[in-house]
Image (cartoon, rainbow, N blue to C red):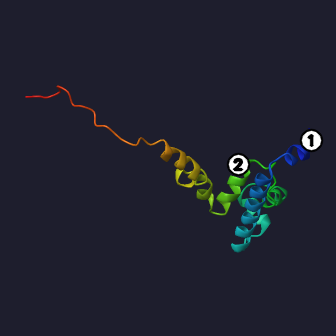
Amino acid sequence: MTQTKKYMNLPIPVKRALGSLGQNLRNARRRRRIPSALLAERASISRTTLVKVESGDPGVSMGIYAKVLMALGMIDNLAALAEVSNDSIGLTLEEERLPERIRQKSIGNNRTS
């Protein structure tokens, strides 16, 4: 299977998310007035790879995306992706499993005199 065919099978939401990420990274670079050659150098990648990152290419490794985020000063955003506070589905499921009533355990004969 060729690389192109492998990535054509990606779900549409994944393609959209990667495209948005690439566009957001490109916009962040442009807002900072950083030429692509300089950002590529700071991230220790080639300009060709940076073009792929900025186009949301799914063949680019997560590590490369992380290096670009770091070079832009945005690496903390990567760590926040799966934080508990951003997991609304997980929090809802957890809340549904909370007990309705909590009983206090009996103390028994653990008294000291």
Q: Nearer the viewer, residue 101 or 6?
A: 101
Farthest front residue?
100
**Residue 5 vs residue 54: left or right?**
right
The nearer-to-camera label among 2 and 1 is 1
Tell me what residue is drawn at x 52 percent, y 49 percent: 91
For image coordinates 17% across by 27% down, the residue present is: 110
In the structure shown, which secondary structural element does the residue marked by tag 1 occupy? loop
Disc on the earlier residue, 2 or 1: 1
The residue pinned by badge 1 equals 2
Residue 54: which quarter of the image? bottom right
Q: Residue 63, which numbered label?
A: 2
Using the image, tell me which numbered label, if any, was put on residue 43: none
Q: Position of residue 3 (x, y in %)?
A: 89, 44
| Residue 10 shows in this picture | yes
> Foreground: 53 or 19?
19
Q: Nearer the viewer, residue 48 or 60?
A: 60
Looking at this rendering, what residue extends furthest in the left direction? 113
Amino acid type indicated by mark 2: Gly
Examine the rendering and report whether any part of residue 87 can be seen: no
Q: Circle 1: is it few (<14), some (14-19), or many (20+) Cα within 10 Å?
A: few
